[in-house]
Image: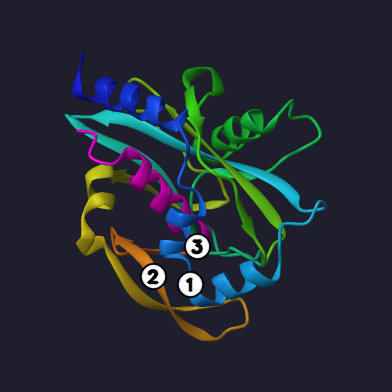
Amino acid sequence: MSAFENFIQKLQERLFKSLPGRTAQWKMAPITRLIELERLKPAGQAKKSAVLILFYPDNGKTRLILIKRALDRSVHSGQVSFPGGKQEKSDRNLEATALREAYEEIGIAPEAVTIIGMLSSIYIPPSNFEVFPFVGFVPEKPVLNGNIEVQRILEVEFAELRNPATRIEKPVFNRNGEEVLVPCYFIQNEIIWGATAMILSELVEVAGEIEV
């Protein structure tokens, strides 16, 4: 068994155990988000969306994929996120949503992906979405093709996310145009903050010290 296969197997086992959820997510939550989450609970009418956390091996390293969204008028314009988006009526379930969106945004064929579990869902007050993160892998380095919604594809070594030096605070402009200091992962000269950083925080905690 390769190191990558061992990592995937052990991660899958941990994803089926009790997850840390908010305890891990809130470590990377901006103070403004914590205030919103305390005040606004996920309502029954929250829209559903799903993202794909996709691992793959690359010359002895374990990587995952993030995307930087194109600049537009959406709430999350220009931010770094996982491939994903809102559930459509044609999606049979949220897993199908994550796979469809990944295919549309980065060209990964759904049938090439093996889903090994999920992380805790997370509510995003600014857009009223509840996001469901699915974890999967492909057995070899994929060919990636970003669509018009994607400004940049980031192929991130998982070990980078475990490095405490990548967790810092940086100023960003929120949706109201105000500059705020937020906890983030600073990788490949990109600020990864908000819901994506919160999801990554739980992922890193779940993976623990599994060798990669």
Residue 47 image offset from top left, x and y in percent: 75, 50
Q: Quadrant of the C terminus?
A: top left
The residue labelled by disc 3 is 79
Q: Residue at x 37, y 41 (%)?
A: 206
Is the C-beta separation of discs 2 and 1 under 8 Å?
Answer: yes
Is the C-beta separation of discs 3 and 2 under 8 Å?
Answer: no
Residue 178 image offset from top left, x and y in percent: 55, 86
| Lateral position of residue 6 relative to residue 89, left or right | left
The residue labelled by disc 2 is 183
Disc 2 marks a residue whose amino acid type is Pro
| Lateral position of residue 189 relative to residue 98, left or right | left
The residue labelled by disc 1 is 30
Q: Quadrant of residue 182?
A: bottom left
Q: Is residue 207 magenta?
A: yes
Q: Residue at x 22, y 60 (%)?
A: 164
Q: Quadrant of residue 143?
A: top left
The residues bearing labels 3 and 1 have C-alpha atoms spaced at a distance of 15 Å
Residue 154 image offset from top left, x and y in percent: 36, 48
Span colored in magenta: 194-212
Residue 51 image offset from top left, x and y in percent: 56, 42
Is the residue marked by circle 1 packed among few (<14), some (14-19), or many (20+) residues within 10 Å? many
Q: Is residue 28 magenta?
A: no
Q: Does 166 appear above or below 179?
A: above
Disc 1 marks a residue whose amino acid type is Pro
Q: Residue at x 34, y 74 (%)?
A: 169
| Lateral position of residue 197 relative to residue 52, left or right | left
